[in-house]
Image (tube, grey):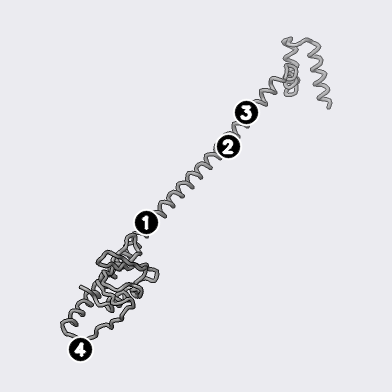
Amino acid sequence: MRTDLSIVKKNLSDLRTDSHQDSKFKIEFKKADGSLHSVNNLNIPKWLPEGEYALTAYCLDGEEPVIILENDILIESKKEVETPVIQNTKNNDPPDDFVLKLRKQDQESWERERNLINKYWETEVARIRGEHNAEKKALVDKHEFEMNLIKNNGDTLEKERDKIRESLAKELRIEKKYDNSVKKRGFGERLLDMVDSNPDLLIAVLDKFKMVDPETVNALKEMNAATGAK
């Protein structure tokens, strides 16, 4: 059943008013012969050729176009003829007026239901997006914490390794120095060390047990005497 052009225009105007300012729309005007015209707004263009059309309006905000209005209309001439909105006057035919009222009530009811559905899905999408962002942030924070923990443990382990390396190197240097020192010192030097620590006792032992020749004993005595004189 064809809808009065003025009512369709008013419905399109209400859709524009109730929609978000950034919303995008499209209207398709299809004739019975299959020819199709479309506009990317919620206006009926003046250039539309005369004839009967199946009007379908879409909202393009989502991933898929959503039909928001469907009507059959008549364009009487290339220049639109504005048909006034039928008012409840004495000149109106009561049955037609009643039908128009019912149709308007159905349209308003459909618009309210559509708005409620849109608000529900907007709220639902916002909730899902918020949960997703919270989960994503929790995973990122956990990953950063674990990476920092691994890094700190690695730094601590490396410091302990450095301490062990330094300690081992020090011990090796001391041991090497001692080995080199012992290897380089001959019997005479080690004997002089013993003389320095307790010369009198060492000279007496060497002399008694004839461990060295008399000349060496005399030399040790002279050295000890000279040291004591100082």
Relative side of 140 to 17, left or right? right
Please state, as top left, top right, bottom left or bottom right, where the N terminus lies in the image.
bottom left
In primary-sequence order, the first of circles 1 and 4 is 4
Q: Please give the residue where the numbered disc 4 appears in the rendered image.
A: 91
Of labels 2 and 4, earlier in sequence is 4
Q: CA distance from mark 2 to mark 1?
A: 47 Å
Q: Nearer the viewer, mark 2 or mark 1?
A: 1
Q: What amino acid is at disc 1?
A: His
What is the total number of numbered labels drawn onto the structure image? 4
> Would you say 86 lies left or right of 143 here?
left
Provide the residue designation for mark 1: 132
Residue 152 point in image, percent of width and height: 51, 45
Residue 172 numbered mark, or none:
3
In the rendered structure, which disc, 2 or 1, sits on the residue that comes first in sequence?
1
Q: Quickly name the residue at label 2.
A: 163
Q: Are marks 2 and 4 in contact (CB under 8 Å)?
A: no
